[in-house]
Image (spheres, helix red, strand yellow):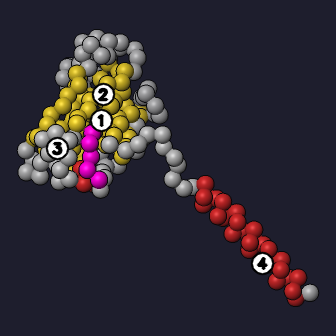
Amino acid sequence: MQIDIKKKKINKTLIMLTIGSLLLAGCGKKESKEEGVIFNNDFEATLGWIENVNGVVRGEAHSGNFLCKTDTLGPYGNTFTLELNKSSDKPLKKVSASVWMLKSTDAAEGVLVIEISNKDKKSLAYISSLTKGVANSTHEWTNIEAFSDLTKKDLNNPSNKITVVFINTSKDRIDIDDVKIKFE
């Protein structure tokens, strides 16, 4: 009788451990089809990002419920800034950035900027992608991209800092969402 109770306790313990192991295995790192280190911001959670004057507002976002509003009062979108050594232990070859934008008028224009600076804050590279000619519709979200080859001019020095920002260069409102920065 005493042995049966111990067996039941052991069986219950084994079952619980097996279920727990299966649950933990399911919570592991998901396989990603994309390679590299990727930082995304859909403005649902903005920890680590420098917020602009207008901030994040609730609205008809590209995804989710929040977007970043840019206009004459706050022309800069939320800014991403990071030292390269915090993104990877290996030398980086390329950085790319993309943002989804929605223009309020045909005249609304902006630019997506990647700037790389050294530890003394001297700008080493300034890459920009203009929205003019790319985003022609005021009723549709449009994706714009910029990238930089980090193997040139010692841009991949680990102490260098990268800054990514969308700048509204017009007087009209532009909403942005789903910013993506990818290091390879």
Q: Is residue 131 visible?
A: yes
Q: Which mark is residue 96?
A: 1
Q: Which residue is mark 2?
A: 145
Amino acid type indicated by mark 4: Ile
Amino acid type indicated by mark 2: Glu
Q: Quadrant of residue 93?
A: top left
Position above or below: 149 against 46: above
**Secondary structure at numbered mark 3:** loop
Image quarter of the C terminus: top left
Q: Is residue 125 left or right of residue 181?
A: left
- The mark that comes first in sequence, 1 or 4, is 4
Q: CA distance from mark 3 to mark 1?
A: 14 Å
Q: Which residue is mark 4?
A: 10
* Mark 2 surroundings: few (<14), some (14-19) or many (≥20) residues within 10 A: some
Q: Which residue is mark 3?
A: 155
* Mark 4 surroundings: few (<14), some (14-19) or many (≥20) residues within 10 A: few
In magenta segment, residue 91: yes
Q: CA distance from mark 2 to mark 1?
A: 7 Å
Badges 2 and 3: C-beta atoms under 8 Å apart? no
**Secondary structure at numbered mark 4:** helix
